[in-house]
Image: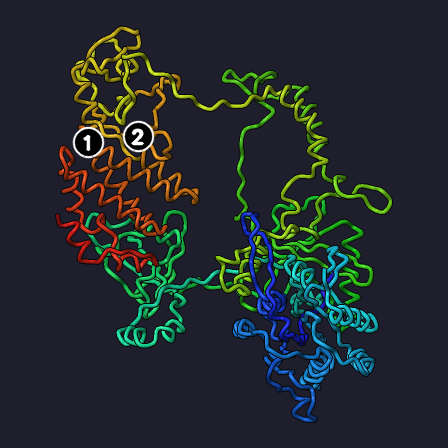
Amino acid sequence: MVAERAGYTVTMFLIDVSKSMGNFRTVTQEDSKGENVTIEMTNLEWSLQFVKLKIQEMIFNGRKTDQCGVIIFGSEETKNIVNTANGGYENVFEYISIGQPNAGTIAKLDKLEASSVCGDPIDALIVGIETQARYLANKKTWTRKVVIVTDGESPIEIEDWEATVKKMDDTNVSLTIVGVDFDDEELEYEEPDKSNVKRVNEKFFHELTSTMANGITGSCAYALRETAMPDIKQTRSALLGTVLRLGDVDTRGEEAIELTVKASKCTATARPKSWKKFGLRERTTDEMDQTQDDEDAANARAAYAMLKMRSEYYVDRTPGEEDEDGDVKMKREDDDENLLDAKNDDEDEDKEVNVESMEKVEKEDLIRGFKYGTTYAPCPDGQFPRLHTRKGIDICGFFPKKNFRRELSMGEIQYIWGDPSSPQQQVALSSIVQAMYEKGSMAIARWVSRDGMDPKMGVLYPVPFDNVDCLIWAQMPFADDVRKYTFPSLTNLINKKGETLTEHPYLPTDEQMEAMDKFVDTMDLMEAGDKDEKGNRLPWFSTLESFNPAIHRVKQAMFHSAITGDITTNPLPPPHPELLKFFEPPKRVVRRSKEALEECKQVFKVKEVPKKVVKAKKEGHVHAQDDDDSILLLDRKQPSDRSPGKSQSQIMRFTQVTPTKNKAVAKDADDSETEDEDDEEMLLDQKKPSTPAPEPRPGSSRNPGGGPLPTPARSMSPEVDPGRAPGRIVGNTYPLQDFQKNISQGDVVSKAVEDLGQVIIEVVLKPFAKRRHSEMLECMEIMRKTCLEEDEIDAWNIFIRELREKCLAKPGNKTFWQEICALGLGLGLISKHEAKKHLGESNVTQNEANEFIST
């Protein structure tokens, strides 16, 4: 069913700013972690959250026909159209005129404060109705809404209120009264120690709205809860005219059919709101002087500016290093005229090549190309010649519904209606729909949105509604775009001899099939929901009651930021329960499937995979595994004078260094012990790479024979000790891999930085540390970059000072520190200037950083 028309509404918010609205209250709410947080605010601030959420919804939807105005009562000033014309109606102020709301509307509401006088809500109601009526004098079809937000503590003149109700009913005005701490049966709340004035006023408000055709009175707490619920933006798609053709209307017009139809959206893709990128704006000298003279005025100006995307193109003309096909590299940056070296954080920015050695080219000198296989087809005009297409939907043929592959449906679905202004066209389309429906057929169609546009292929599905017949269009892929992936049969296994196997661990038995069928049946959700009026179980999941968590959680975060001045004291609350409704399976189904699950475990012999336990070290013969112990000797040169008949597997050895013997002890495949004088030297020169070494090419220096390298059996591979000290998450064996793995988790950055720093210090201070210098330098580069991006600048500066002190001490490692100094500021202290570029802070000056790395 098509959604009702939205928008074309003017909502008047009447806000009570009387003295009593300044009373403080304690509000308890959950933060994003589910912990209770206590916040102190005034009744006005609390009730304004509802108004700002409603206005933020209008801004979020972006309809020009969704407008609002704000009138405050109980203000010390008086300004309204009724007072100007006839006098009276004191302490009522037209705060925001009727119009489309924007961010300024929210900011202006934040400035409201409680006054020292009282205001009459009936006076504000009459002023609001009159203001709204004058604005909508020529817009009689618009919807009129009035919302009163009050605590009900101010006296009310209730004379002739029936006339006000009659006028609102005559003009179809809906009234909503949101009361602060009003009694609420839904929330089972009744305010204790309620004043007599509030009790009388609350009773009057209920009587007022009950006599209206469209009125309601409720509590502010309930209104805030309902406003936080996820809702769906209702829209009605505009009808777009096109032509439906069946047959060749040009050459065989007497056998063809051409109908005028209208298309509208049946579904529309919804995505979370995108976030714009901002960068810290660099201040000029004049602005710095102004900051010293008037800091408040300078802070009032925007310190951040939205980044603008620009593209720069570079070509590598270096001889011998040019890319295949002479590809042009593109560098994307978010930039603004007055920003601090803002860089794009996109994934492709991380993969960006070094453009310093490349030549910059202008966009006008480039020719657009389209990738075709491994090459590019140049297109000087920017686009290949289009097909000569004609606007309309051409039916190419019909096929049975049962042959339709629903998994190939692409994109959005659209309705195809007969022309609403032509009954003849509607009857003609209805006859086609009825014929397709009775035959159980669907149509293959070719849709061209405008003359000369690229065609789309899709299907037309007949839908006979109660009062109208129409077709539904679904786009389908072209045949060239469908990829077919084949894989071996799961039930028909053939061995190397060509025999078909009937028993195999990969082939399920009848007992296993029966157990799995039973388990699947017990997980059926079609009767796992609540009971209906007749006592029948309903399905557990309903698409109408489910919401996209990404869309509504982002929306909730945006709305909360709009109504909250301080996120620290008023954090983002947890997701609404409606968003989490279908995150966990129903307990009824879990209990029902428990027995079947246990049966499956027994039949399939499912066992929990035990965690790997570090093997106990042998007594006195093997020391703790260090970085270069238990190395598989694949990189060593094979001796040229190998004994005849000795296989490759016999030459492959595992070595371990013992504290009593410096030479490596190796075991051949026949378990006979032998000694190799080259093994000790091999172990001392071996360097453990931070990433697995690539397999050597045939004929390389590492594989001079060109033959295949020996591949050890999986059972022979030794377990590598990660070398993690107790309490650390980064080990000495593969520090960079451990660090990057923990950084990807996002919540242990500080711990990972601290542990990696300690590992680097330990490694470089060990004997024979030179073989791992390059690895440690790589770790430091990654660590420093992470500290800049993750605001761990102080941790880096503390680490690099400690490393310098210990390297220059005795025995130390002066060679390693000299290598760091040779690399320059890239591995030195992070100064204020560099930290500012990454929106961080540092207490190190540029001179200190230069002096630190030069010694």
> In the picture, which quadrant includes the N terminus?
bottom right
Q: Residue furthest right?
A: 534
Q: How far from the left and from the top, in percent, is residue 259?
A: 71, 67
Numbered circle sitting on residue 769: 1
Q: Amino acid at mark 2?
A: Thr
- Which SS class for mark 2? loop
- Look at mark 2 in the image and give the residue it sits on: 733
Q: Amino acid at mark 1?
A: Ala
Q: Is residue 729 left or right of residue 539?
A: left
Q: How far from the left and from the top, in percent, is residue 750?
A: 37, 44
Residue 361, picture quadrant = bottom left
Q: Residue at x 43, y 63 (%)?
A: 383
Q: How far from the left and from the top, in percent, is residue 749?
A: 38, 44
Visible in this render: residue 578? Answer: yes
Q: Residues within 10 Å of mark 2 (few under 14, many from 20)?
A: many
Residue 302, picture quadrant = bottom left
Q: Residue at x 74, y 62 (%)?
A: 183
Numbered circle sitting on residue 51: none
Measured along the vertical axis of the image, is residue 414 above or below residue 64? above
